[in-house]
Image: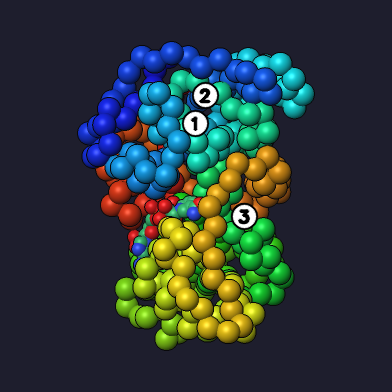
């Protein structure tokens, strides 16, 4: 099968299309013919250094896939050949998403939301599961709470705004001015132009901050939290600031999550969640996708088409 392999850890030019062996589904696994593969910052971060991830013999980046079940291994009860599925299998072990086929434990996938194309569905799993697991599972956002989403136009942020709204929260996003219309259309009640004001000067009494930026943004976010507030930071564990009494700060690492994917699909199907796909490129242009993504200015998601 065709796959984009990492020839050596480093720049995007190290992503090269190769013929590699097609994987076989084992016990409890399915083989998925990939139609579209989503691109995430972890793809280029791990391509750059190989760090954090358990790689297979041939390193293939990418976790987000949407496709069709081609074969099922022994013991799989939830899917049949021909089912359309989406998911983020195996993370943080290699899934090999930038390829024509992936093998996944069956419950690392869920039925693709009806009404979404494979390109749209491939934009969802990692970013939407991150937002879901951070806001719902870790921060327990409740109706009426005030939620601040940093980088609200980005891959995680634009889905987090919608998920927080669907949970009944009052949502404030940070984004540069050109992206305010998009963030408002996604449901944000307020948008702050982080380039012209310091967010902590104009935002306060926040129950939950979802921070996709880390560093000084995480530190400064403590100032806007009210008592009982929760800060969830995403870039890495070193971005978690030391907290004062009465608030919590944690790093959350996204996990494969069948039930979370079903919740996300249900939100899509009732019209409460939709991915924004800014850029679609063919698999062989994975290096270009990384170069665009690494600039850090994406609105929504970048997706590769595979079949
Ligand atoms: N822990 C986990 O499991 C996990 C899971 C997913 C992602 N992450 C991490 O979370 C981070 C965000 O991921 P992502 O997929 O959302 O990234 P992304 O899509 O690449 O984010 C791009 C967005 O960031 C915005 N941005 C950049 N600087 C900003 C600032 N100072 N204030 C507000 N917005 C700013 C940009 O908007 P402007 O052009 O307006 O600046 C752009 O829309 C990454 O570091 C990623 O590795 C962690």
The kind of secondary structure element at disc 3 is: helix
Q: Residue furthest right?
A: 77
Residue 101 in view here: yes
Picture residue at 34% right of the left edge, 26% below the top: 5
Circle 3: is it few (<14), some (14-19), or many (20+) Cα within 10 Å?
some
Query: Which picture quadrant has residue 12?
Result: top left
Q: Earlier in the sequence, mark 2 or mark 3?
A: 2
Q: CA distance from mark 1 to mark 2?
A: 7 Å
Query: Which picture quadrant has residue 163?
Result: bottom right
- In the picture of the structure, the residue carrying the numbered disc 3 is 133
Label 3 CB, ligand 1: below 8 Å? yes
Q: Is residue 218 above or below residue 134?
A: below
- In the picture of the structure, the residue carrying the numbered disc 1 is 95
Q: Quadrant of ligand 1?
A: bottom left
Q: Earlier in the sequence, mark 1 or mark 2?
A: 1
Query: Which picture quadrant has residue 193?
Result: bottom left
Picture residue at 37% right of the left edge, 43% below the top: 51
| Number of residue marks | 3
Circle 1: is it few (<14), some (14-19), or many (20+) Cα within 10 Å?
many
- In the picture of the structure, the residue carrying the numbered disc 2 is 102
- Label 1–label 3 contact, CB within 8 A: no
- Label 1–label 2 contact, CB within 8 A: yes
The kind of secondary structure element at disc 1 is: loop
Q: CA distance from mark 1 to mark 3?
A: 20 Å
Q: CA distance from mark 2 to mark 3?
A: 24 Å
């Amino acid at each position: 099968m065709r796959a984009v392999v990492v020839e050596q850890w480093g720049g995007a030019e190290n992503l090269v299309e190769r013929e590699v062996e097609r994987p076989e589904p084992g016990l409890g696994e399915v083989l998925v013919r990939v139609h579209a593969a989503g691109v995430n910052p972890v793809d280029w971060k791990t391509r750059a250094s190989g760090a954090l991830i358990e790689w297979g013999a041939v390193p293939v980046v990418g976790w987000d896939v949407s496709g069709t079940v081609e074969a099922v291994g022994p013991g799989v009860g939830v899917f049949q050949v021909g089912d359309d599925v989406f998911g983020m299998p195996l993370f943080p072990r290699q899934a090999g998403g930038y390829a024509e086929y992936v093998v996944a434990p069956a419950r690392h996938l869920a039925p693709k939301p009806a009404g979404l194309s494979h390109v749209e569905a491939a934009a969802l799993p990692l970013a939407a599961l991150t937002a879901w697991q951070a806001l719902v599972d870790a921060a327990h956002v409740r109706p009426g709470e005030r939620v601040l989403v940093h980088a609200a136009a980005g891959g995680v942020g634009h889905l987090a705004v919608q998920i927080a709204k669907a949970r009944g929260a009052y949502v404030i996003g940070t984004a540069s001015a050109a992206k305010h219309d998009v963030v408002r259309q996604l449901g944000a009640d307020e948008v702050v132009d982080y380039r012209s004001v310091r967010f902590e000067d104009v935002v306060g009494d926040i129950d939950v901050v979802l921070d996709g930026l880390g560093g000084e943004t995480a530190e400064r976010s403590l100032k806007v939290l009210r008592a009982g507030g929760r800060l969830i930071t995403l870039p890495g564990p070193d971005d978690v600031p030391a907290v004062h009494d009465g608030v919590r700060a944690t790093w959350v690492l996204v996990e494969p999550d069948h039930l979370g994917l079903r919740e996300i699909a249900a939100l899509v199907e009732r019209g409460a969640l939709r991915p924004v796909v800014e850029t679609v490129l063919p698999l062989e242009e994975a290096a270009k996708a990384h170069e665009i993504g690494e600039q850090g200015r994406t609105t929504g998601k970048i997706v590769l088409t595979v079949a």
